Image (cartoon, rainbow, N blue to C red):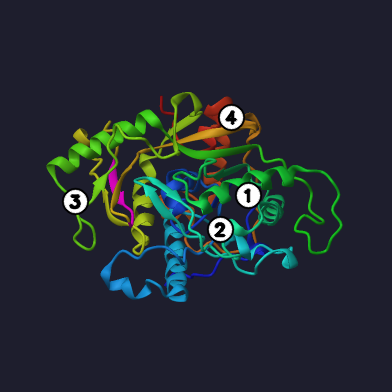
Amino acid sequence: MTSTQGTRTAELPTGGVLGVFAHPDDETLGAGGLLASAARVGLPVTVVTGNRGERGQVIPRELAHLDGDAPALVHERERELAHACAELGVRARLFLDQLPGLAARRPPRFTDSGMVWTRPGLAGPVPDAGPDAQSSVPVEVAARLLAGLVRRTRPQVVITEEPHGGYGHPDHVHAHQVTMRAVEMAADAAEVDDADDPLTGLEPWHVPVVLWAVESEIRMRAALHWLEEKLARAPQFGARGDALATLPAGSELPSLAFPTSKVDLTIDTTAVLPAVVAAMRAYRTQLQNVHLEDLSRSEQRDQPACGWVAVSNGLLLPIMGSASMHLVPGFDRVDELVVEPVHHAYTEPVPVAQRYGLAGTFGLAALDVKNRLADTRGTARLAAFLGGAVLA
């Protein structure tokens, strides 16, 4: 059985990629292709999750007993997160409230803030989030906790939500704000002398690259049109027999859809789609009707999407064979990306090489990334670092 315990902070790897997201499943839905691609080429990947998703809806009937039972649902969602991260190749994972420090300034445990749908594809806050909800924790406090982790792990790339949280969920917006403030704090050279301050005794670290996981508006509309045509020919049904629908291709899109001019890089992630889909299937409480097309068939290649997945409100989303990103000005120093020896004190239960069928060990896989970075510059260097080919 996969452990549901998060990685201890003393066991965290250094370098590589750090992803920060709100709930279990956000790392997979929001950036699964990026995380799996980085892991596939041997980079250490760490995921921080804001809360345990105890207010999430439960989809299948056989798990309906978890609905409204917060401790039981937390246990299940922790288990799902562990399983999904293992499928993606994530080497270390923890919850934001597990980071040490500032005990007198924050609740000991951060909980799910909850949300309501204000229209298809757009969420808003609920009035009863409570003082221990993630979105109620002051950004300066949560960011300082995360900044300590950034200084300890010194990631080359940090990945998080775009400013509006992908679709408006208050915890997603909070995760974005906390991450952006944390990378600023981690780089601040001001001296700190407080035993309970997470930054005390740690050297500043200026993250070379911070990126927001987004989607190209053009690619997303094409994928939604493809999905509409699929549904017209073959209607899809949820775990409880309800008909599933998708956003009309011509409708107002969620905030994660960025205009082409603001998408700085799109990489091919088809090689890791089996891992991403396996991670989606780990989230039985939250996701349903996960389908990956047979990409070995010639007619399935060059399609706008590679499959679909439905969330708890019955909305079908396309599974893309690409990952797009927006680089944050000031944290877009792609030419400074390097691959360093990874120092860690934990044992990887499933070696990355074994998981992805790579020849050799993690060290050799990382050496391959280093070799591929040679003579690369600009976004091509970032693509090589993350293990993906640049898509036009």
Please report the bounds of the magenta region as a residue range. 306-312
The first of marks 3 and 4 along the sequence is 3
* Front-lying residue, 176 or 124: 124
Is residue 108 in the magenta section?
Answer: no
Q: For residue 330, what is the image quadrant?
A: top right
Disc 4 marks which residue?
374
Mark 4 vs mark 2: give the one in front: 2
Tag of residue 50: 2
Instruction: State the SS at label 2.
Output: loop
The residue where tag 1 is placed is: 178
| Kind of residue sitting beneath label 4 | Ala
User: What label sits on residue 247 in the rendered view?
Assistant: none
Q: Which residue is mark 3?
A: 236
Is 41 situated left or right of 58 in this image?
right
- Quadrant containing the C terminus is top left
Query: Looking at the image, is 158 positioned above or below residue 267?
Result: below
Q: Earlier in the sequence, mark 3 or mark 1?
A: 1
Q: Nearer the viewer, residue 107 or 328?
A: 107
Residue appearing at x 41%, y 40% in the figure: 254
Q: Are marks 4 and 2 in contact (CB under 8 Å)?
A: no
**Against 388, is 18 above or below?**
below
Identify residue type, mark 3.
Gln
Q: CA distance from mark 4 to mark 2?
A: 36 Å
